[in-house]
Image (cartoon, coloured by chain):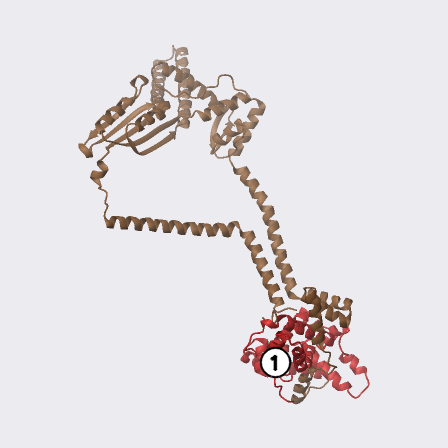
Chain colours: A brown, B red
Amino acid sequence: MTTPHEDNLEMQLAALTKWEGEDPQLWRAALAGTDQGAEKDSGKTGVVHGAQARRGIGADLRRRARLVMDRRIPTRLVAVLALGVIGVVIAAVMMPTMSARRERNAPAVAMAPAEAYQKQEGRGLSFDRSGSGGEWARKPGEPEILGRKLERTQAAEEPAPPVEELRAEAASRDDQMVQAGVPMTRLPTPATQPGAPAASAARLDAAAARSVIRKATIELRSADVRGTFLKASNIASEARGEYMSDSSLTGEGASMHATLTLRVAAERLGEVLNALRELGKVEAEKADGEDVTNQIVDLEARLRNEQRVEAELLQLLEKRGEAPLKEILELRDKIGEIRGRIEQMTAQREKLGRLVSLATVIVIIRAEDAKEGAAPIDHGLGSYFSKELKTSWNNGLRGLTDTVTGIVRVALAGAVWWILLIFAIAVVRRVWKSTAPGASPARSAA
Amino acid sequence: MDKPTTSDEDLIARFLGGDRPALGELAARHERALLGLAKGVLGGREELARDAVQETWVRVIRFGHTFRAGAKFKTWLYRVLINQCRSMRPPRERTGLLDAGTDGVDGGIEERGEIMDGPRRSAMRVGGDLESRARMDGLRAAVERLGEEKRDVLLLCYHAGMTHEMAAEVLEIPLGTLKSRLNAALGELRGRLAMEAVG
């Protein structure tokens, strides 16, 4: 083969696009095909018929199948479709997994009592038996280990942990203290030697009857501050050991202001608050509580230990009555130290008991017209404008927040559906472009 | 050739208005040219070229109403044909990347049994047009290897009655782009032909 001359090359290129055969009058076939297709309401079918008229059904079908297989669009569509299916499958697989995880993480409402106690009590604490004396020691963390150990304890029907015993002993000493006139909050005491079910019930009781120091603050407005102050001070029942620990009444007229601190029985807190609410218009109310159960239990354990040491030293003192005076004096000094610590801890225990048994209620009473006197309501145009401006601004911010939240929610929650929608739109666009002639030379299809 | 008194745009408007012979008149003006261009773009496969042209007419019939008044009908018609031809070409032929070891496009076309003889078969023939026929087949194979963009530009620009401006409109590319592609295509084609002549 030789390289064509420049002129020859141009001529040959022109010859490549020159039709030398007969005139096939294809427009007639096309027109006939579309006529037939119009009758069948399908233009493409008509084209097939036109081609079939020339080449037969088999060849035309083979050609069309080859064209479909060769086209890029179906390949891309199949790829997108496959991705969509994979996405849906992944979502379908993930959703049950996430649901199951949510169920696992959700609080077990219908959980067995022992398990409920483990969840409630064991969070952040664990119990482990260490040493030969069978002492139980608290360790931080490992809630699951706690659960397993408690289950094993129940299965083996071992006696309850010493903490329960301590509580029982503390309760018995509480009885003695109450009999002596000291107000105490009784810790739960197992009625019987705890077996597995009894231990679970006792733990649940202990969880339910925790030692909580309760405080409440209530702010009242009253036309008669002094009268309300007197009524509030009379709410405390001295017969129940309740009292008013602090009070003040200051100012005159609209600026009169009273403050009371009441110590009322914890179980009467709700009743007292209700009574206070009836004395005036409630402006503000707040209540909180501090759980001191662990402090009490620890204090009692240390107290019990000191008492045991004291008893041992006393026994030793009795047995060694003939010992040298120096040793006896040293022993007495030791016993004295221990008794000092015991008294200190007993005082702490009593204080905690009082705090638990008596809730603190702080009552603030203001004059009803104090507000008008202190800050008169401004009915002016400026006030109205600033108020409306503030309201509009807040509403605008709230609306913006709602809009953003809504968009994020729709975008995230409907991600799968958006993907499917985009895929559907892409398919429709492809089909539309493939049926529109001459729209884009690169993408138009047959 | 006398210039037709009625323009293509008028004819298509008449056809869309129900004058069916107007389509025949349009076909008389353009069908052979369309067939030639389709044959060139489709690698010399006449049967495919017939299909492409027939479907082009079908599209003119079905979508003639989308033809914008004021545009050139011939440009629109050729654009439809080019799109049709492109959609009918297998993807590997669009890119110009043919299998190594084959005899260019002829090898692939021979497998389909739809094309005139290839160079090797031509060489075995005895006759006066043997050399020119082999040369044309070699040229066609070299054009096929150019890739879709260059190939279409080359064939359109050297197609009878087609100006560069019209070719640019058909391909929907700027005139400058068309010319640069044409130069690149010609350069590459000459290089290929020279290589084949040496080899």
Expressed as whole percent of the image width and height from the top left, the position of residue A162 reads 48, 22
Residue A265 relative to residue A124: left or right: left
- Asked which quadrant contains residue A222, the reply is top left
Q: In which quarter of the image is the N terminus of chain B?
A: bottom right
Identify which residue is drawn at 77% across, 73% down. Answer: B113
Query: Residue A381, relative to residue A141: is it above or below?
Result: below
Expressed as whole percent of the image width and height from the top left, the position of residue B37 reads 67, 79
Residue A242 relative to residue A37: left or right: left
Expressed as whole percent of the image width and height from the top left, the position of residue A86 reads 62, 53
Disc count in the image? 1
Nearest the eye: B2 or A378: B2
- Asked which quadrant contains residue A428, the reply is bottom right
Query: Residue A281, relative to residue A378: is it above or below?
Result: above
Nearest the eye: A51 or A366: A51
Please indicate, yes or no, whether residue B96 appears anywhere in the rendered image: no
Nearest the eye: B163 or A85: B163
Residue B80 relative to residue A269: left or right: right
Q: Which residue lies furthest to the left in this view?
A: A252
Query: Residue A231, relative to residue B143: is it above or below?
Result: above
Nearest the eye: A106 or A206: A106
Q: In which quarter of the image is the C terminus of chain B?
A: bottom right
Identify which residue is drawn at 62% across, 69% down. Answer: A444
Please indicate, yes or no, whether residue A197 appears anywhere in the rendered image: yes
Residue type, mark 1 in image? Asp
Expressed as whole percent of the image width and height from the top left, the position of residue A166 reads 45, 21
Q: What element carries label 1?
A: helix
Q: Which chain carries label 1?
A: B
Task: Please name the residue that numbered disc 1 is placed on.
Answer: B8
- Asked which quadrant contains residue B195, the reply is bottom right
